[in-house]
Each structure stands twice: as structure tokens, then as C-alpha cells.
Amino acid sequence: MSLSVSKRMAAIRPSPTGAVLALATELRAAGRDIISLGAGEPDFDTPQPIKDAAKRAIDDGATKYTPIDGTAELKAAIQLKFRQENQLSYKTSQIVVSSGAKQCLFNLCMGLLGPGDEAIIPSPYWVSYPDMVRLAGAEPVIVAAGIEQDFKITPEQLAAAISDKTRLLILNSPSNPTGASYSKAELQALGATLAAHPQIVVVADDIYEHIQWGDEAFISFAAACPELFDRTVTINGVSKAYAMTGWRIGYAAGPQALISAMKTIQSQSTSNPCSVSQIAAQAALLGDQVPVRQMTRAYKERHDYVVAALNAIEGFQCRSGEGTFYAFPRVTGALQALGLGSDADLVERLIKEADVACVPGSAFGAPGYIRLSFACSMETLKEAINRIKRVVLA
């Protein structure tokens, strides 16, 4: 007997980054010395004080259900973080804690969007944005911003993409996959365009906020455009900055009606996020921030090496980023020189002939690019670059 799945699955793809990681794992199991530059995951361990807080929580019996939208203590820590770091003030009823920032984004799409709605997504984009929009029954509207414009959309592009169906704009800064970060002036220019369209909600995905080293300090969209505060949802989490990907804690703050809808959706899916992880996240937000700065300095050092090394490879063009732990070189010259038809072909050749796994740019809505994560040691990066050179320059 054959079983059918829902019609909505026809429009949804498995995560391309997950597929690369699975292939790398499979090849390693077969004895191959695979260097994986595909993972969006810090290579550092969770700082010890955070782990100690979690251990105490287990010993103290903090292993029961919590409120669906997070403990009062963690929400208070999130309030303080927003107030001190972002100059944003939220009531606890305007905050929801979820099992990762990804769940926050999913809950928002499900709570806001429906059939006939549109969501504007700048490209290159994080791979899950379009499929989340489609799962909510809405249509993603992709606005392309290539390396020539620093991977950032312009107010003119935004204005041209807006229709009477537009309900959401997704902004990710610093960006996965490009490392590009919007300045305050650039955010304000986008905000000025949005001011005439009160039906549009902005979601600011700030998950890489602390992994930034640009000339201008990070600023969240709601802080840059206070006039749009009441229709901005700010999403963040502890996964990237605190090397806590497996702990699965993200949070969102925004208009109470939307946060309430997100909470309701969560109540019918996962319910509360992990109790022990919430205590660990509280310790992360309230504790010593020196480890965050130390990790970011290491990422910056790796970034500088990788960008220079990639630009030294004929056929590669890599923009310096302002943050994250990704490089996103354009490889059209290399494709032409190697006689390859697509970025996916290059990624396949690199994993088969160089034992280096990365992700094709087409997965991020940007054909002709590839994404490399430098969340690994400098020694590993140097070996990976040497392997890439041997294949590309052969």
C-alpha cells in the first residue's frame, strides 16, 4: 500500500545544508577524510559557567514543564538584554521563548501569513525562509541583491516588490550566508519606504548580532526605525553567540497580538522549550560576556584569512563580511574555467575530489556562489583551502 503526503509538501524541500552534512557524515563513515565547511555551527564548546548552571538545574529538579512561552526568569533576562544592548523596551507579554530562533520564525509565519499573502525575502537568504512562508500558505517574493551591491537590497528594490498582498519583510543582519550587515542609515532608508505600507510587518532576524566586527556597531531594525516599532518582530537566540546550538533556545519580541499568536501555535506544537536549556540561556544572557568576545575575535581572524585566500584563487570573488562565520564567494569564473554548469556541480566536485564539503549558493537563492563556514580551526581552514586550490587550479 502506498501512502500519500499532504499537497503542501510538493512545494517544500529538505534543508540543503542538512543534506550536505548528511553526505559528509556518510563519507566519513566510509573512511574519507572529509573537511566539512557546511555547518552553521560554532566549533567552540559552550562556556563552562553556562554548563554548570544547567547541571545545577538538573540537580535542583528543574526538569518539569514551564510556561509555554518561557520562564519568568528567562523572560526578565531577555527584557534586560533588549534594554541594555538594543535600547528596546518590551513587556514580558511581548516576549516568547521557543525551541530555537527557527521555531520563532516558523511560528511567526504561521501566525501572520495565509493564502493570498506575500512575504518579501532578500536574496541571498537563509535556506528556510521561503519554505516557512510556503508552509504558511503564502508566497515568497525574492528580491535579489548580488555582490555588486554588497548583498543588501535598496529602498527602490523594496518599493518595487511591495504589493497589496505584502504582509511581511524578512531582514537578516548580519546575514547568513553572506556576512553582510545593514548600517543604521540603510535600515532607516528601508524603514522610510515601509512607512507608507502599514500592513507590512518586519521580522528582524538578529541571531548573529554579537558575531560582528564591521566599522559600524550593530543596530537592530526596531532601534534604527522606532516609528516602526509596533510592527517589528525582533528574533534572537543563544545558539550562535554562546555556542549553544544543541540547547535549542530562541526568543522573539514584538507586538503583543503577534506574540500571542506565536504562543498559541507553540502551545499546539512543542509546548514549552526545554526547562534546563532555559536556565542555561538565562545564565548565558546574565553572565560574563568575555567568552562571546573571544569567540568573535577568533571568527574575525579566520574571516580575514579565508576572504584573502579565496580571492587569491582564480575564478573566485569574495566580499569581506561584517559578521557571522561564513564566506560567500562568487565562483562563476571558476565554473567557466572548469567547464561546470552550476554551483552545485562545483560543490559536488569539491566533495568528491577535494574531500571538502560546502553548500551551493543556489540553496540560498544565489546561483553562481558557494557558502563556506569558517567555524573550524585555522589549521583546518588552511588545509581546506589548499585542497580547493588543487581541484580548481588543476
Image (tube, rainbow, N blue to C red):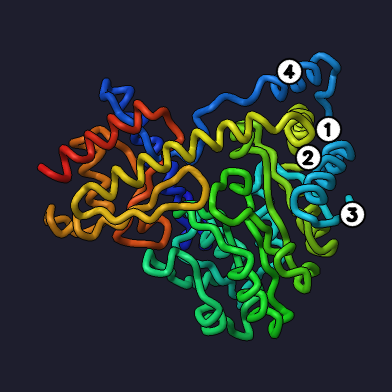
Tell me if residue 15 comes above or below residue 259 in the rendering: above
Relative placement, left or right, of 357 versus 154 is: left
* Sequence-first tag of 3 and 2: 3
Seen at 80% across and 54% down, the residue is 264
Q: Position of residue 313 (x, y in %)?
A: 22, 47
Relative placement, left or right, of 82 versus 23 is: right
Residue at the spot of label 2: 272
Residue at the spot of label 4: 52
Identified by mark 3, the residue type is Lys
Label 4 Cα neighbours within 10 Å, binned few <14 / some 14-19 / many ≥20: few
Q: Position of residue 389 (x, y in %)?
A: 19, 40
Identified by mark 2, the residue type is Asn
Seen at 59% across and 56% down, the residue is 216
Disc 1 from disc 2: Cα separation = 7 Å
Q: Are marks 1 and 2 in contact (CB under 8 Å)?
A: yes
Front of the two marks 2 and 4: 4
